[in-house]
Amino acid sequence: MQVKSTEKELIGHTMMEVYPGIENTELFVKLKMSMENKAVIRMDNHFIYPDGTKGWFKLFIHPWSNGIIIFSFDITKHKHKNDEINLNFKLEELESSIKSEEDKQKLSEIKRLFAEIHEPEVSISN
């Protein structure tokens, strides 16, 4: 869930009250553009929660009767997977250009550490 707040914490408050500084973001510009121009907007939004954790969301912003409606989908895992694929590709490019055996061993160690950090999550669902 993108919003880690309760309905009670949100209802009756503006976005600026709930998320101080949001008016200085690309997201806010897009929200305003959708409202003013009755435009449908799609975007990926990098969201930083008040507790410092981060997530990526695909947003579909649509004009609605008295404002806008936002459909939000969490794409954090997808973004991380793409980052991992891009890093692996860059490591392979680097590996093909390395000549010294010592640098090859260092790169091998970096790849091993990276693999340990990015082990796939195990989830059990019923």
Image: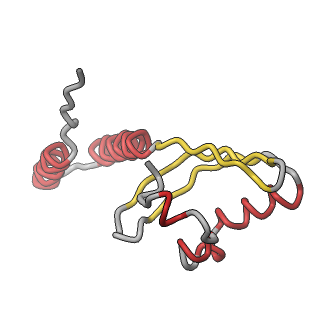
| Residue 68 in the image, given as x and y percentages of width and height | 75, 52
Q: Total number of numbered labels? A: 0
Q: Quadrant of the C terminus?
A: top left
Q: Which residue is rendered at x = 68% and y = 66% of the image?
A: 28
| Colour treatment of the image | secondary structure
In this view, 54 is above or below 112: below
| Residue 70 in the image, given as x and y percentages of width and height | 66, 48
| Residue 26 in the image, given as x and y percentages of width and height | 65, 66
| Residue 31 in the image, given as x and y percentages of width and height | 72, 60
* Relative side of 107 to 11, left or right: left
Front-lying residue, 72 or 116: 72
Front-lying residue, 101 or 118: 118
In this view, 105 is above or below 36: above
* Relative side of 84 to 78, left or right: left
Considering every residue shown, the one lying at the far top of the view is: 126
- Image quadrant in which you'd find residue 24: bottom right
* Relative side of 113 to 47, left or right: left
* Relative side of 65 to 43, left or right: right
Q: Which residue is rendered at x = 34% and y = 43% of the image?
A: 84
In this view, 55 is above or below 115: below
Front-lying residue, 114 or 125: 125
Q: Which residue is rendered at x = 21% and y = 31% of the image?
A: 123
In this view, 16 is above or below 7: below
Q: Which residue is rendered at x = 18% and y = 39% of the image?
A: 119
